[in-house]
Image: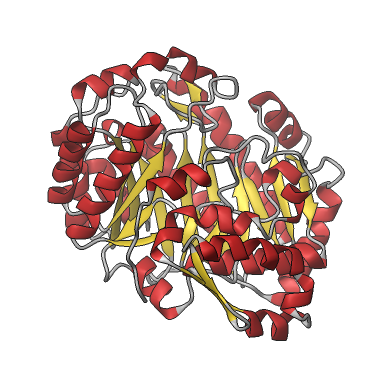
Amino acid sequence: MDRNIILDPTLIAKYDQSGPRYTSYPTAVEFSQQFNQEDYVTACDRGNQAQRPLSLYVHIPFCDTVCFYCACNKIATKDRKLAQPYLDRVKQELALHGALLDHKRQVVQLHFGGGTPTFISQPQMQELMEAIQHSFNLAADDSGEYSIEIDPREADTSTVILLRKLGFNRMSLGVQDFNPQVQKAVNRIQSESKTAEVLNAAREAGFSSISVDLIYGLPLQSVASFAETLERIIKLDPDRVSLFNYAHLPQMFPPQRRINVSELPSPAVKLEILNTAIECLTASGYVFIGMDHFARPNDELAIAQQQGTLYRNFQGYSTHANCDLVGLGVTSIGIMDTTYSQNLKNLDGYYQALDANKLPIFRGIALNLDDQIRRDVITQLICHFSLQFKSIEMKWGIIFADYFQSAISRLTEMQEDGLLVLNGNGIWVQPRGRLLIRNICMLFDAYLAKKSGPGRFSKVI
């Protein structure tokens, strides 16, 4: 597979727009409160009949301090006592899901996100894992992909050792930027030595994959300063690097109102930062997986992409495609059979539902046949940068050129711009089109086509 990327400023400017990140199709914007707990129970029955393996996502919303750039669902607090009432409800939610799902279905993927999962104490983490083991069938041989998001300021060597003992074998470390001025501007003071301590402890403890999260486009960043951060990250040698685009949407995410807009890099500088980052990472041996992700060639994501088995869901790129996903905790999203469902977004509502012994699901969507076909197309493109029409035709019983006549006609202009190669057999995204993969996927999005604009989405670059 050709993994080259070309950042063409002219094309970036031409295709500059907002759009979904396609961790799902349809996206969460299309979820409806008409979807209810009964719909979810029926989907669980179908999932049990299919005997698909399971993926679990656990959301821990608490953070000790708020990072001004953050767009996650979180609760910034110094009060650690808030954790236990929340965990008590998560354990109850675990039991409710466990009663619905066949215990023979093995959990091949587990992810703790937030917030800051290590906000909770080590005994609380142990109790939570025991509750998961009680309700679900976890892999006992370390074959599962069990990951956790780590704020290095909220962890040390003993934390890492405990997490490994509890079965976690992958972690992602939030860094964003090592520059002191940038850190101060976004209220995230984090030393390189602290980050290195946690990363090295994870390596020593036997974590099989370690990822580092960075953000470009933050206040006071420059091409030179971010290149220095990258150089220091590359020396730490993580298995993966996630390079996220900062989307300044203060109307949606109130903490961002504390960012000084005049200190944000201009669009031209931001693009140059991205280009420099791509050059640094690829020159150091990382390969571009897609969207914002880079990995070492021997990392399982890179291998899955080479083998054509890479998948994308609400946790991002994944090696486990054929799973039902159980979302646990406030605001979590699940995938069960051909449905998506989301938990209540506020603690009071979440607590009230579970105190009434009800699942805290408040909205979702049941995918129709067209949704499933388009999801398959978008997933293939965003994971593999290519699409064989015959595979879609055989799986879904359609004639691709007829079914997607409108999209194909619009792809012609992208072909003329060098973003892709299009013929009667399929689509092959070219190096100039890989950073614009979201634009390409959007042509197959039936929901966007019905709207005047892409809605509440971030810029593609």
Q: What coloring was used for the rendering?
A: secondary structure
269 or 240, which lies in front? Answer: 269
Residue sticking out furthest to the front: 416
Q: Quadrant of residue 185?
A: top left
Q: Where is residue 373 in the image (x, y as percent from the top left)?
A: 73, 69
Question: Image height check: is 253 above or below 147?
Answer: above
Number of numbered discs: 0
Q: In which quarter of the image is residue 456?
A: top right
Question: Which residue is located at x 65 percent, y 85 percent?
Answer: 390
| Image-based side of 459 in relation to 211, left or right | right
Question: Which residue is located at x 35 percent, y 39 percent?
Answer: 271
Q: Position of residue 447 (x, y in %)?
A: 76, 50
150 or 156, which lies in front? Answer: 150
Q: Quadrant of the N terminus?
A: bottom left
Q: In the rendered image, is residue 273 in sight?
A: yes
Q: Where is residue 386 in the image (x, y as percent from the top left)?
A: 51, 73
Question: Image height check: is 340 above or below 256?
Answer: below
Question: Image height check: is 340 above or below 93?
Answer: below
Q: In the rendered image, is residue 138 in sight?
A: no
Question: Which residue is located at x 49 percent, y 75 percent?
Answer: 309
Q: In which quarter of the image is residue 458?
A: top right
Question: Which residue is located at x 54 percent, y 25 percent?
Answer: 249
| Image-based side of 431 in relation to 311, left or right | left
Q: In which quarter of the image is the C terminus?
A: top left
| Image-based side of 290 in relation to 297, left or right | right
Q: Position of residue 421 (x, y in %)?
A: 51, 72
